[in-house]
Image (cartoon, rainbow, N blue to C red):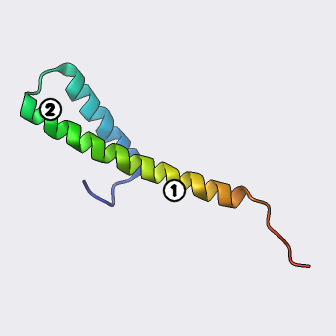
Amino acid sequence: MNQKMSFEQALARLQEITEKLESGEEGLDASMKLFEEGAKLTAFCRKKLDTAEQKVQVLSQPEETEA
């Protein structure tokens, strides 16, 4: 997986993988490789979302002013 991949690209690839796995047309070995790739992409997307959520929380906090 390309670490420079955007969240949107990773999500699109996950959708492709899901469709392939749901079709049942892939063999066992190919399905396992797709599943592994999907697991990595899921972790990548989760990390991106967690980072974005943390940033939103920081930006949403009222600024403290020094007296």
Q: Residue at x 15, y 40 (%)?
A: 33
Image coordinates of residue 14 in percent, x first then y, are 31, 38
- Residue furthest to the bottom: 67
Q: Residue at x 32, y 33 (%)?
A: 15
Asked where in the image residue 35 lies, by quadrant, the reply is: top left
Specify whether 19 is left or right of 31.
right
**Up/down of 30 relative to 64, above or below:** above
Q: Of the residues shown, which amino acid type is indicated by label 1?
A: Thr
Circle 2 is placed at which residue position?
A: 31
Say if mark 1 contacts mark 2, CB within 8 Å.
Answer: no
Circle 1 is placed at which residue position?
A: 51
The mark that comes first in sequence, 1 or 2, is 2
Q: Of the residues shown, which amino acid type is indicated by label 2?
A: Ser
The C terminus, quarter of image: bottom right
Image coordinates of residue 43 in percent, x first then y, are 36, 47
Q: Residue at x 24, y 53 (%)?
A: 1
Image coordinates of residue 8 in percent, x first then y, are 40, 45
Image coordinates of residue 50 in percent, x first then y, are 51, 51
Specify few, some or many for label 1: CA neighbours under 10 Å numbering under 14, 14-19, or 20 or more.
few
Q: Residue at x 27, y 33 (%)?
A: 16
Describe the element under mark 1 as helix, strand or loop: helix
